[in-house]
Amino acid sequence: MLNQSQVIETIDMIEKEHLDIRTVTMGISLLPCVRESAEKTAKAVYERVVGKAEKLSSVTEALSREYGIPIVNKRVSVTPVSLITAAFPEESVSVALALDRAAETLGIDFLGGYSALVHKGTADFENTFLDTIPEALASTKRLCSSVNVGSTRSGINMDAVRRIGELVKEIAARTEREGGIGCAKFVAFCNAVEDNPFMAGAFHGTGEADTVVSVGVSGPGVILHALKGVPGADLTEAAETVKRTAFKITRAGQLVAGEAAKRLGVRFGIVDLSLAPTPARGDSVAHILEELGLETVGGHGTTAALALLNDAVKKGGVMASPRVGGLSGAFIPVSEDIGMIEAAEAGKISVDKLEAMTCVCSVGLDMIAIPGDTPASTISAILADEAAIGMVNGKTTAMRVIPVPGKKVGDEVSFGGLLGRAPVMPVHTGSAEKFISRGGLIPAPIHSFRN
């Protein structure tokens, strides 16, 4: 039980330090929905998602009122749709539309799982499915898509990497009126995890239970406030402060996740203790790094400071919950973090530095706006670099970049809400076309052979 001082401390974290439950995500298996036609499968998908998640919004809203903890998003993740539509991949968009209707009916903000897993090779049905992604994202509002192109055990599927660059360009073109926002709903992974509650990369893994509830907590403002309380501490004590604070944040997530699973009558999945920033001032991962002593994020020392932060968050979280999973660390999305936005506007942080930071953070290059005329091969090369970092280091990495149609370096694009705004950042102009066009497979590293 919480004592009086702990209750007061939690109230302060909520009211003054932006503590929230960023998402309650229900994962739903769609495997029972496969039928002999796309039309019948889409109908079964809609009915199953709406039936399973019909109480998701009401339960989370009730928990938020009862515990006084803001729950920002209610989301659903589903089995990778490429598996559900394997018999009729050219008609996969019908399932995409059904999922989007289900999300609207449920009153949730995003639904993830229009996904394919092609890390070792791409089957014919998956090639056809990949071709449907731009239309699916342009035709829907709440649907998110992801593709896993590599893993530490399998290597990197460079044929898929090449195709992703082309897909990103097509998605941007199809959503040009909205600044290429379709690209904000698409992410490419290496070492994708099956229990990620955060969009745009969430999908319900085939090794998961039939239906689960997972929670993503967030608390950059709480961590920042805690560090402000120890201004003269050395880095050892700073790490301990972050660890203790992460423990408290994760306990809130554990409480909400357990109760949500009980009330919804489904399994408790995981608590993802990632520090997910927002564009609100006081809720920035970049500002945490600056509180550790950097003059500005992006300068020398940024990667080391981020490594300290990420490690301390994980250590504190795993002590607070037996079900820590997902990505669990610090996110560094440019458009969704006011400190990152300001550093990019001032030219203090580059895509290269962000890439270096992904070696030690939770995911990868995230919500980065780049010039609209960036070649597809360059986008593929950026993904290849990120996938290589993930493959060699045995961690999840990802790329979510937005080639904003008609925009050049120094321009800005606004997506609104949690997606924020982003200055268009430069990328290298040297061509990677010959490298990307080779295709094939980048073999897995020697340490992948562990049997």
Image: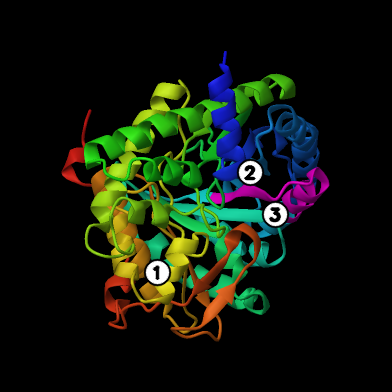
First in residue order: circle 3 vs circle 1: 3
Residue in the image at 43% along x and 52% along y:
285
Expressed as whole percent of the image width and height from the top left, the position of residue 70 reads 66, 39
* Res 84 label: 2
First in residue order: circle 3 vs circle 2: 2
Give the extent of the magenta segment.
97-115
Q: What colour scheme has been applied to the protein in the rendered image? A: rainbow
Measure how far apart labels 1 and 2 are at the Cα level: 43 Å
Give the camera-side residue of 59 and 442. Answer: 59
First in residue order: circle 1 vs circle 2: 2
User: Which residue in the protein does label 3 denote?
Assistant: 96
Expressed as whole percent of the image width and height from the top left, the position of residue 119 reads 39, 49
Mark 3–mark 2 CB contact (< 8 Å): no
Measure how far apart labels 3 and 2 are at the Cα level: 11 Å
Q: Residues within 10 Å of mark 3 (few under 14, many from 20)?
A: many
Q: Nearer the viewer, mark 3 or mark 1?
A: 1
Residue in the image at 47% along x and 36% along y:
273
Residue in the image at 56% along x and 50% along y:
199
Type of the residue with mark 2: Ile
User: Which residue in the protein does label 1 denote?
Assistant: 343
Secondary structure beneath dot 1 equals: helix
* Res 49 label: none
Type of the residue with mark 1: Ala
